[in-house]
Amino acid sequence: MKCPLCNGKFRKQIITHEEWWEDSLYVFKDVPALVCDNCGDISFTDEVSEAMDRLIQSKEEPTEYLTNVPVFSLKRRKKTLA
């Protein structure tokens, strides 16, 4: 399968995927995905996407929780980035 962004080749990989749902961040481990070996674009089958959506909407207990995730803003650093 060819990547629609760069025409690179997709390869099957098991990845960790982050997904925002409203104001919450969800992390999925051991996710089967297709990853472009050229640009890194990620694609999921419909089944995988639906499974992640169902888990987010369910009240199932997560495998684990992550804490102390640092968040940085580059807004104040505009002058040094320009």
Image (cartoon, rainbow, N blue to C red):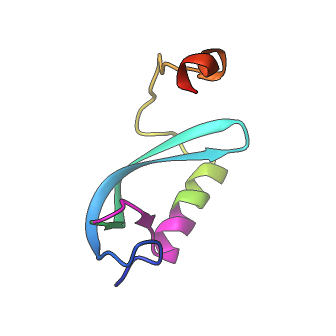
Identify the residue at horizontal 61%, vertical 18% (top origin).
Answer: 79
- Whether residue 50 appears in magenta in the rendering, the answer is yes
- Decide: is 3 above or below 63: below
Residue in front for this viewpoint, 31 or 59: 31
Residue in front for this viewpoint, 69 or 53: 69
Q: On the rendered structure, is 65 left or right of 78?
A: left
Q: On the rendered structure, is 78 left or right of 30?
A: right
For the view shown, which residue lies furthest in the bottom direction? 1
For the view shown, which residue lies furthest in the front direction? 82
Q: On the rendered structure, is 31 left or right of 49?
A: left
Query: Residue 8 at what x, y percent from top left?
Result: 32, 75
Residue in front for this viewpoint, 81 or 74: 81
- Decide: is 80 above or below 30: above
Image quadrant where residue 10 sits: bottom left
Query: Residue 47 at what x, y percent from top left?
Result: 49, 74
Query: Residue 21 at what x, y percent from top left?
Result: 67, 46
Identify the residue at horizontal 62%, vertical 44% (top origin).
Answer: 20
Q: On the rendered structure, is 31 left or right of 24?
A: left
Query: Residue 31 at what x, y percent from top left?
Result: 36, 58
How many labels sit on residues? 0
Residue in front for this viewpoint, 31 or 76: 76
Instruction: Look at the image and tell me in which quarter the N terminus lies.
Output: bottom left
Q: Which residues are magenta?
A: 38-51
Instruction: Look at the image and tell me in which quarter the C terminus lies.
Output: top right
- Decide: is 8 above or below 33: below
- Whether residue 42 appears in magenta in the rendering, the answer is yes
Identify the residue at horizontal 66%, vertical 21% (top origin).
Answer: 75
- Decide: is 21 above or below 81: below
